[in-house]
Amino acid sequence: MKIVHTADWHIGKVVNNHSLIEDQRTILNDWLAQTVALKPDLVIMAGDLYDRTLPSGETVQLVNETLTKMSQELACPICIIAGNHDSGERVGYAAGLLSGQGLHMAGVPSTEIQKVEVGDADVYLLPFSDHLTIKRLYPEETIRSIEDATKVQVGRIKDKWDPSRVNIILYHGYVTAGAIEGAGEDLEKSDSERPLSIGTSEYVPHTVFDGFDYVALGHLHGPQQVGSPRIRYSGSPLKFSKSEVHHHKGFLEIDLDKKADTIEVVKHELRPDKDMRIMRGQFEDLLQGQSDDYIFFELTDAYAQHEAMNRLKKRYPNAMSLEYVALENRQRQDLKTKRHEVQATPVWDQFAQFYQNNTDQELSAFQAEIVRDIFQSTLKEDKA
């Protein structure tokens, strides 16, 4: 069985006031052309179809255009779940009607977990939801975290599944191979991924999905496997932040053979017309070049340059941001030095300096003696 796994399209994404809508249109057309050529048995999109719960008209138009092309050009079922950026109700709109066209959309969770039969395979769709929503669906269960909620949902699937068939599940969230105490340390994350909850309660151990032939994950924007070659994030098709400039974006081709108990994974790269990258160097040197790429500038100049960003944008119209890394490093060092100086100065002398800065007057010798006695007495009490 051949599967194409993609996720995290974030259609309508805006990065540093730059709309990526046209870049997304181009890259999704490229993805679809490559996918059609592979002739898959199943296409999976594991969440975050939209970037916002209330997308713009232009965004909805591109989603409609893309899904229409997919249903027309792909000769296989397409399974899509809502992610944490999506509006579940919007993703699930007209799902019953669309399923007749081979487009299976799961937007909101249900006690009847959506299953799509594809030949010898059963594909289970778990749209993103917080644990409180799942608790309302299963009031008899003890659910205090996303992990608890996922265990309950997976348990309901396994109560009814046929282990002799190929069992596939779509899930959107953090899945970790590490212990919950250090959850997430094994994962490569990026700045554009929105947290799902507080602390480690958002993480699900990969062992929750034991027994599935393939677990198609969404949420993390870098392609990676979690504890097993059968549990994978495909990553996003485009770069969405400075922390992702080193990513090689694309999608996954998965070949499963249940009888032989084998899995083969091929990563297919997607190359945008405009890359997202970092350029570091002296301002005058950078000003000699030009590019339409999305650029994060890191200037090594010792001093700030006059109207640096405006001047760079004449050569780099899609400049994203500008940092003076040498200045920032020097400021951090200065701050560290000042902190050491303050720590080495007796607290009563620090107070005397504070008093002078705020009143433009020095403490008298009598006042300074009283302040010193008070602080010394307090410090002795603290040590006792």
Image (cartoon, rainbow, N blue to C red):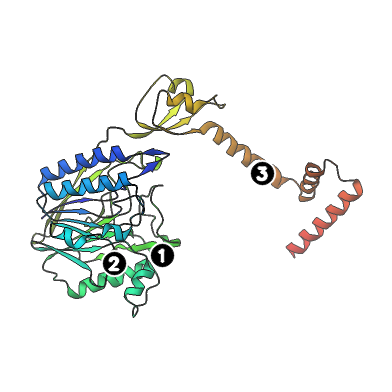
Disc 3, SS: helix
Camera-nearest residue between 360 and 49: 49
Q: Is residue 281 left or right of residue 248?
A: right
Separation of disc 3 and disc 2 at Cα? 55 Å
Q: Amino acid at mark 2?
A: Pro
Residue under numbered circle 1: 201
Camera-nearest residue between 195 and 247: 195
Camera-nearest residue between 76 and 214: 76
- Report which quarter residue 77 is drawn in: bottom left
Q: Is residue 297 left or right of residue 359?
A: left
Q: Is residue 352 above or below residue 155?
A: above
- Residue at the spot x=41%, y=56% of the render? 195
Q: Amino acid at mark 3?
A: His
Q: Which of label 1 and label 3 is nearer to you? A: 1
Which quarter of the rendering shows the C terminus?
Answer: bottom right
Q: Position of residue 54 (x, y in %)?
A: 36, 53
Residue under numbered circle 3: 340
Total labels: the figure holds: 3
Disc 1, SS: helix
N-terminal-most mark, 1 or 2: 2
Separation of disc 1 and disc 3 at Cα? 38 Å
- Report which quarter residue 53 is drawn in: bottom left
The label number, if any, that marks residue 212 in the structure image: none
Separation of disc 1 and disc 2 at Cα? 19 Å
Q: Can the viewer see residue 282 in this picture?
A: no
Query: In the current view of this chain or complex, which residue is farthest to the bottom?
Result: 140
Q: Can the viewer see residue 318 in this picture?
A: yes
Q: Which of label 3 and label 2 is nearer to you? A: 2
The label number, if any, that marks residue 109 in the structure image: 2
- Residue at the spot x=15%, y=55% of the render? 263
